[in-house]
Image (cartoon, rainbow, N blue to C red):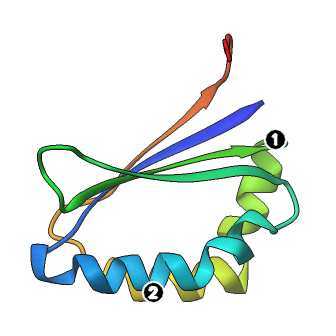
């Protein structure tokens, strides 16, 4: 399982705009071929910092998404709202206990 974690930090006045973008596109992202799971988290202390957490069948599936029209559209809208450079990690899931 290929897992992607992305940290996004927004201008505080732009948080609602980001949440609207995510709400509009979350189903399209989740339904993208190769995406098996998608979640959005919000930092408990800094409410302008978010994390996306997604599972992909493999790195190629993620890269296909990252080169898609959907990603280009969402990222173009989202990156205008940042107050810091996004950070991303690609990790392999080793253990999961329900």
Residue 4 location, quadrant? top right
What residue is pinned by disc 1? 58
Q: Is residue 42 visible?
A: yes
State the residue in front, 58 or 19: 19
Image x and y of residue 82, in percent: 23, 72
State the residue in front, 85 or 77: 77
Residue 66 location, quadrant? bottom right
Q: Is residue 67 visible?
A: no
Image x and y of residue 56, in percent: 76, 46
What residue is pinned by disc 2? 76
Q: Residue furthest front?
A: 98
Where 11 sits versus 69, above or below? above
The answer to whether residue 24 is left or right of residue 17 is right
Image x and y of residue 25, in percent: 61, 80
Q: Residue at x 56, y 52 (%)?
A: 39
Rendered-image quadrant of the N terminus: top right
Rendered-image quadrant of the C terminus: top right
Q: Residue at x 20, y 44 (%)?
A: 44
Label 2's element? helix
The answer to whether residue 57 is left or right of residue 50 is right
Gap between marks 2 and 1 measured at Cα: 24 Å
């Amino acid at each position: 399982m290929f897992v992607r974690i992305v940290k996004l930090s927004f201008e505080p006045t732009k948080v609602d705009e980001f949440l609207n973008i995510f709400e509009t596109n979350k189903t399209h992202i989740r339904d993208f071929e190769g995406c098996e799971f998608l979640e959005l988290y919000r930092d408990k202390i800094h409410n302008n910092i978010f994390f996306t957490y997604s599972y992909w069948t493999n790195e190629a599936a993620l890269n296909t998404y990252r080169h898609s029209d959907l990603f280009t559209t969402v990222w173009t809208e989202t990156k205008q709202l940042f107050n810091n450079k996004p950070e991303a990690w690609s990790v392999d899931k080793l253990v999961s206990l329900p």
